[in-house]
Image (cartoon, rainbow, N blue to C red):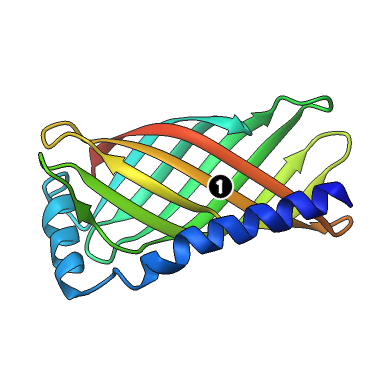
Amino acid sequence: MRRRLQTVVAAAIALSIAAPLFGQANDEAEEVDRIGLGRLSEGPSIIGAGIVIGAPTGVTAKVWFTETGFGIDAAAAWRLTDNSSFHLQADGLFHLALVETEGGRYIVPYVGIGVTNRLSDDPRLGLRVPVGLSLLPFRALPLEFFAEIAPGVGIWPETDADLEFGLGARFYFPL
């Protein structure tokens, strides 16, 4: 019961942070998005690889479609708790806006939906809703730092609440 209450509170906090960001996506932000991310790629997308630290901790990759702002990320990670387990997860991400700060840095809020699969003695399949921020701090270096929280729900073998979070970095390569 306590874990479910924690997950509900975390989901409410994540949604209250993300809700105002939906209104920021506009034509001007979309144009900046295409121009800003286009400098990293000659084609319609870029791919990044890196690490994520949190619950779970592991390696991550992301394909970011620069013309639409849609992305697909995946992770292969370990949850280092009392009953350690290996996780595979994948998300579809909607980048809501591209906010340019002084000095040419970009902050990109995102929200998504995805699946997670825990591979252990007690396997589990679930859904997750990641909400996060990406930071692109350098004009000349295609590096992304990100922070996200992902409330979720187990759907097999039983229904239960879950909460994942992570801090990470990815280096992007043009496709």
Left or right, 74 with reference to 122: left
Measured along the vertical axis of the image, is residue 55 above or below residue 90? Answer: above
Q: Is residue 88 visible?
A: yes
Measured along the vertical axis of the image, is residue 31 above or below residue 47? Answer: below
Amino acid found under the numbered disc labelled 1:
Ile
Measured along the vertical axis of the image, is residue 165 above or below residue 85? Answer: below
Residue 94 falls in image quadrant: bottom left
**Which sits in the foreground, 144 or 132?**
132
Left or right, 112 with reference to 88: left
Question: How far across and how far down the image is residue 65, in percent?
Answer: 29, 58
The residue lying at 67 percent from left, 38 percent from top is: 87
**Which type of secondary structure does the marked residue at label 1 adopt?**
strand
Q: Is residue 152 visible?
A: no
Q: Which residue is mark 1?
A: 149
Measured along the vertical axis of the image, is residue 25 above or below residue 95? Answer: below
Question: How far across and how far down the image is residue 26, in percent?
Answer: 23, 74
Residue 35 falls in image quadrant: bottom left
Question: How far across and how far down the image is residue 108, in percent?
Answer: 31, 52
Question: How far across and how far down the image is residue 79, in percent?
Answer: 70, 30
The residue lying at 48 percent from left, 36 percent from top is: 60
How many residues crowd around disc 1 within 10 Å: few (fewer than 14), some, or many (20 or more)?
many
**Circle count:** 1
